[in-house]
Amino acid sequence: MDTKNLKKQTLFISRDNFEYILTGEQKTEHRDILPSVEKRYIYTEGEGENMKVYPVKYDALYLINGRRKDSPRMLVEIESADLVAFMNEKTDEPLMVPYGDGMIEDWQIWYHLGKVLETENVPEDFEFKYAGKATYDYGMDDSPFNNENGTFNLIYINFEDEEEG
C-alpha cells in the first residue's frame, strides 16, 4: 500500500500503548481535546445552536514511542473517529476539568484503529515488555457510540452519592 499520500496525525505514545497497538491488543487510541490543540482534532460548521462539531479526517496515525531519532514508530490505519463529551449523569451537565487558570468541558477524540501499515525502528527481536497484559480496550465491537447525528457522543459519568456521616 502506498502510504505517502495518506493524511496522517502524528502522536507521541507510551511504550505500553505502543506495544498493545503493535500486537493488536489495543484497537482505540484517544486524546484530550484541549484549546491549545483542538484544531488538530476538530472543526465546526454553523454557529450558535446550529453549530456542529466534527472530527478532522485522518487516514492514519503516525505513532512515536519516544523523542529520539531512533525511537520506535508505526503508521496505523484509522477506521473511524469519535468525539466524546463526558457528562455528569446526575446533572446532565458537561464534566469540567482544570485548564490553565480556569475550567473547560472534558472532550476527547477516540481513534478506532485498523491494521498497522508500517513500522520503523522496530527490530525483529523487539523486546515486548507489556504485550499480552492489556487490561482494557474500547474496540469497534464494544463501542457504545452511535455517531449518526454527525456531531459528538456523550459518555455519562455516574458520581456516587457521598455518604454523610
Image (tube, rainbow, N blue to C red):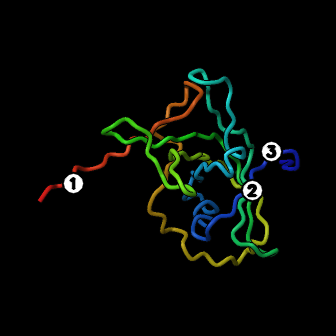
- The residue depicted at 55 percent of the width and 69 percent of the height is 131
Q: Mark 3 points at which residue?
A: 7
- In space, the residues marked 1 and 2 are separated at their CA atoms by 42 Å
Seen in the image, is 103 located left or right of residue 46? left
Rendering coords of residue 126 (x, y %): 68, 76
Tally the numbered discs: 3
Q: What element carries label 1?
A: loop
Of the image marks 1 and 2, the number of the one nearer the N terminus: 2
Q: What element carries label 3?
A: loop
Q: Name the residue under label 1.
A: 162
- In space, the residues marked 3 and 2 are separated at their CA atoms by 10 Å
Q: Mark 2 points at which residue?
A: 10
Q: Residue furthest top?
A: 50
User: Which amino acid, by three-letter code, is at mark 3?
Assistant: Lys
Q: In which quarter of the image is the C terminus?
A: bottom left
Vertical arrangement, residue 79 with respect to residue 99, above or below = above
Residue 19 falls in image quadrant: bottom right
User: Which amino acid, by three-letter code, is at mark 2?
Assistant: Thr
